[in-house]
Amino acid sequence: MTDKTATFTELYMSRYLLAGLAMLASASGLGAQQRATPVQPTVIRNATVLTVTQGTLESTDVLLENGRIARIGRNVQAPSGARIVDGTGKYLLPGIIDAHSHAMSDAINEGSLSVTSMTRIQDVLNPTAGNLYRILAGGVTTLHILHGSANSIGGQNAVVKLKFGRSLDEMMFPGAMPGIKFALGENPKRASRAPQRGETARYPATRMGVEAVIRDAFTRARDYKRDWDEYRAAVARRDARAVPPRRDLELEPLVEIIEGKRWVHAHSYRSDEILMLLQLADEFGFRIRTLQHVLEGFKVASEIAAHGAMASTFADNWSYKIEAYDAIPHNAAVMTSHGVVVSLNSDSDERARRMNIEAAKMVKYGGLSDDEALKLVTYNPALQLGIQDRVGSIEVGKDADVVLWSQHPLSVYAVAEMTFIDGEVFFDRSQEATRLARLEQERRELEQAEPNRGPAPAAARGAGSNRQGGSR
Amino acid sequence: MRRAPRYLALALGAALTAAVAAPIGAQAYQVTSVGDQGTYVIRGARIVTLNGPDIENGTVVIRNGRIEAVGASVQVPANARLIEAAGLTVYPGMMDAATNMGLVEIPQGANPTVDLSEPGDFNPQARAIVAIHPHSQHFAVSRMVGVTSVVSMPRGGLIAGQAATINLAGSANADFALTPHAALVINLPRTGGGGFGFGGGFGGFGGGGSNQANRDKQLADLRSILRDAESYGRAHAAYAADRRLPRPAEDVVLASLVPYVRGERPVIFGADRAADIRSAVQFATEMNLKPIIMGGTEAYLVTDLLRQRDVPVILTSVLRQPAREDDPYSLNYETAGKLHRAGVRFSISTGNDGSSVRDLPFHAGMASAHGLPKGEALKAVTLAPAQIMNVADRIGSIEVGKVANIVVTDGDLLEPRTNTRYLFIDGRPIELTSRHEELYKEFRDRKRPVITP
């Protein structure tokens, strides 16, 4: 028994060691090398280009060069050494942006307090999470990764490009606006989580308490900002007695919100809590950037538009809990018609692989046009994250984050064939068999590697088990 | 593909066909959401029959709940209500053979709306048909996309209870039951050691595997109750034949098992991993049960066995994430195609509790995008589940004599942009509305109150 335990411990330790070394390698040497190598240019020939912002271009070539969309047109000349992709009969769409994801997060909720603005989701991201490749294969190139919804004011967000196989540094979206998660309703009042024995109930327990928690936090943040403003003013007039206030990592992000330097992405369901937050934000002089989920947004779309908030919702997910019972699939269309910038999101690594279908549903429910539906998963989420000058549409000068689809991406029969990010191929369906063979070989080599060998036969003998190994 | 005028030529139809009386359209549906079993004619549509070739410009006659005639040149009966369906397509309604429809309205935080599972391991007496809430909002929402029938089943334990095959319209179970006692639902204890989670979900793949000793005991208990039911059935049969014999006691639990242990009705086994599918088939063979595999994630590894024993699969895993990190990304998308090519009988299901059953066409569509021919994808959500659940004599195709579960669309039934234009369940026209449509109408034009200072 002890022998066996020891062997397993060794095994796991060595695995972590290997993984750690691999990460070090990719973070330092390898990553740097990859960056130094110029990216092979690509010309996609004769595709139907769904620009999203400039309409649909038939039989069009697109040149991806130096990480950007360099040219769009007919008979585009290919630079020497360019990869030529035949797009005949296929559709080129900007990479899909998933506006609410928890992919690659090793932790989601710091649920011990109801205000955890000091925490950062960036600190717990795992760039090697296997789901990322599947999401890439669904034509997604950018993820908005959010803290969970356990807290009235949650942690800071991260926006990443889905450069699977690279270091986290290379994945972080440069220039994305800093953001933070807020949450209203059932989750921050911990409706589905009864306190365990010996545990005191966490405040707040009602929607009244959620409002009060946020109000209290911003009241403190406003004071904290005054302290700093006064200090800076004193320094400016060369007051030798000026003493800097004590830094507060909880309140700093909230001051950034008040100053418009950090955007709020607020998980919300019911119309009353949506209005509560909009009114509170108005009172403290900041704007909610996006309401997330916002399943009853259709009931107060006019108020959302007036405040200037955007909205990121599900296509048609409903009835999974009480506050989702009035959700309707027309939500995106109604908010759009009231002038709200709407995106669709997955909030699920499974759904993230088929956001094109989620968008297509919105043509049926509420009558959005094909272009409006496509915007829900491309340009609009880009706008919500402040990255619309870089991604979200196919325009010259933008990042070469594009996906070639076998059919119109609003068709259920469409599959993503190639996913490009910054002009590099990160998913290529035609190379899938080769990739799988390579993985299989790597697995065999790892299994045969000295540190990964199973327990010695002597140790395994006895306990009548042959339960090891795969169960296929 | 879309947006053919909805009530095009209704008046025209009446004028051209003297025999035809009231044209039907939205106006006809205002009073009740479910209309009469009258005589209806759908004319000029493409008809996807499923049991034969498509009819490009055909007519379907519905009378007293049944399909009375189908074809390219069909006499339009007098006094029929006419739907001019040029540019539209007629399909049989879809069927999802693995749901908990009507047994749960809101799964989280609303326990009073949840009637899914009883405590304990053996609950064959728990019958979905007596607890399906006919006014669940999930019914209308599902049928909006053309799902007209489902199998609804309890969950949990080793014997979860009995599933019902139902139509998605009706106020009493006598209205909507197609087969009130459609199948027994068994979740065999999983094979193998613990620790290999499948990510939760429907059927027998949640949580860790049980240890071998516990599994052996559970299997022994299961065999024991099934054998008790056999004996019980024999004793009662003998007593029925000869009243001089001692009268055997009545037992609700054992009595409910009798038709299943006699092989008169099928048993649905929740099983996803290859080893669990094999052990379910072996167990069914040993106990003379008629197995259906529900789940079927790894059914592609067991195709020879499934084909040889003619065991059908209700595949609920099309959209599920592959279990292992190094599995091909498209592994579960491709399984339906593999089963088709291997000659295994299967249907595609959402495996959903109810609210997302409306995604059924997209499960089938995704399978089609990854190797399942389009026609087979359609069959996997219409005729195939009807055959697996032994209701293909009544539903699953546009065929004379069958129950008129019919959906008329403006495009490919499996495409998300397609709209349902007309819907019939049990030969009754169904108003195309739901809680969602009603809330949409109520709020879509709402403006915020203008506050004057």
Image: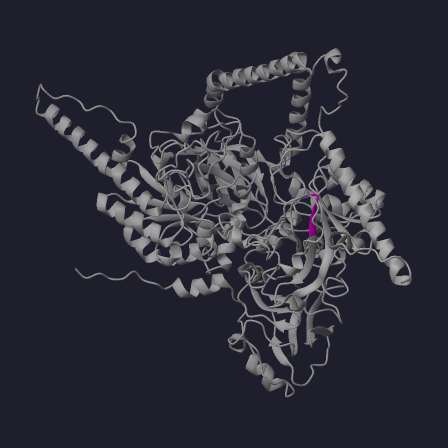
Determine whether, in the image, residue A125 is placed left or right of residue B165.
left
Determine whether, in the image, residue A404 is placed left or right of residue B428.
left
- Quarter that holds the N terminus of chain B: bottom right
Instruction: Kindly identify the residue that appears in the image at 47 percent across and 36 percent down.
Output: A102
Determine whether, in the image, residue B178 is placed left or right of residue B241.
left
Tell whether position B159 is magenta. yes
Residue B300 image point, x, y percent: 74, 40
Residue A422 image point, x, y percent: 46, 33
Figure disc tally: 0
Which one is in front, B316 or B91? B316
Tell whether position B205 is magenta. no
Instruction: Kindly identify the residue that appears in the image at 64 percent across and 35 percent down.
Output: B328
Specify the quadrant of the image occupied by residue B91: bottom right
Residue B230 image point, x, y percent: 84, 50
Residue range of the region highlighted in magenta in the rendering: B157-161
Residue B347 image point, x, y percent: 71, 52
Specify the quadrant of the image occupied by residue A214: top left
Determine whether, in the image, residue A232 is placed left or right of residue A140.
left
* Prevailing SS of the magenta stretch: strand
Instruction: Kindly identify the residue that appears in the image at 17 percent across and 29 percent down.
Output: A227
- Quarter that holds the C terminus of chain B: bottom left
